[in-house]
Image (cartoon, rainbow, N blue to C red):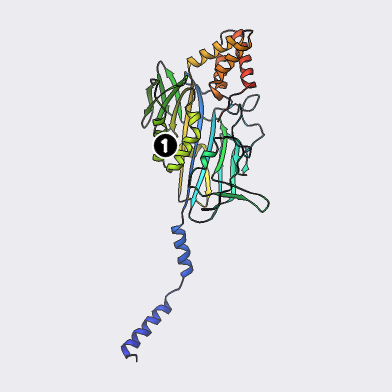
Amino acid sequence: MFTRITLRFAIAFLLAVLSTPWTPRLEAQDQSQRQGRFVAHEWGTFTSVSTADGRAQLWNPLSGPSELPSFVYKTLGRCGKGSGGTLALVRMETPVIYFYSDRDIRASVNVDFPKGCITEWYPLANAKINAIGWNGFVAQPGAKEKFPVDRSRSHYYPARETDASPLSLGDEQKVEQEKFLFYRGIGFFDPPLSVRLKDDQVIVRNAEQDEIAKVILFENHEGRSGWRIHGGLKGEAAIARPALGQGVESLLREFEKTLVEQGLYEKEAVAMVKTWRDSWFEEGLRVFYIVPRRATDDILPITIVPRPSELNRVFVGRAEIITPEMKKEILTAAHLFGENSSDARASAVNSVRRYGRFADPVLREAVNDARDNASRQAIKELTAAVIAKPAGHR
């Protein structure tokens, strides 16, 4: 039997419970939001070309085959400058956006490109000249991956080698799935870093207020490579051209380490380096640098809904330098091309094609520097032959 004291305590406890608001659903919902994980990571590159004296060079980054899979969407409209509508200062290459979540999340992304044009993308998007958006895609952690493929050996595919959530976008009639949101474009803005040659040094100048975390000078001449690393850059610095004969494997690891330090996950960093290793270390002299985050946000303002708890954007700048040696080789090839010999012409074309997609700006610069009409005409004829059999590009 209850004693009077026990009964009093029971009544007091019951009154306390009844007087307390009961909101278990609201508490559970708030707890779920606090524990939910929604993270976005993006990497990409900005590629520019500079003359030896530091002038930004217009070039045609869309020349030659794209080496992208056949399922990637491409714009058919005029986008760049010049008579062909394809000349630009910067190639915005392979930005990919990954998402990580612990449950299915429907989201939307919009990226503006006020000083450029969108040229390629996947999956299906609302693509405009200066912006691109994906509305209502679903990040599905653990979903069975049914990504599109074709028979090409495209450098597009290594970007899938991460732990990111598969993304689905579409309706009952058509659903497209991918590991990331992919887009590309060409730009008409000055890059954050300018470069010029002075004797055997490359002068690099940071045009931004924020520090550039790392600068790497790399050179490949006829298969022999060399590189130098400069730490944080504010203002201007001179970097001596490297001695050739170094292997690139240790540089690959340096790239991966740097990308992780900037906020990418390890698999993302490996995927980025694997995507670009063939192109980054091809023939030529170039400077790589980490684009300051504020500069990336200014060039490519991004909006993600719902807002992720973490958004990392890591872009690598690539500044290609047209060296005096390259121009001299082009002029030699032009004279060789003028000989009445099929072997000589083939040798001249192959000599220029070693520079891949960067043969275009080198040829343009060589035409500008030619001293007589005959030389200019020879270079133009060589250019037409190279275009007829273009070198691949990324």
Closest to the observer, 20 or 280: 280
Amino acid on which the number 1 mark rests in the picture: Glu
| Front residue of 266 and 259 | 266
Toward the right, the furthest residue is 173
Q: How far across and down, in percent of the image, does residue 129 sit? A: 62, 37
Image height of 30 relative to 297, above or below = below
Q: Residues within 10 Å of mark 1 (few under 14, many from 20)?
A: many
| Relative horizontal placement of residue 123, taking residue 46 as reference (left or right) | right
Residue 99: % across, % down: 50, 48
Please say if 339 is above or below 5.
above
The part of the image, by quadrant, that contains residue 391 is top right
Q: Residue at x 52, y 13 (%)?
A: 329
Q: How many marks?
A: 1
The residue lying furthest to the bottom in this view is 1
Q: Is residue 212 visible?
A: no
Residue 49 shown left or right of residue 152 in the figure: left
Question: Foreground residue, 123 or 368?
Answer: 123
For mark 1, give the secondary structure: helix
Say which residue label 1 marks: 256
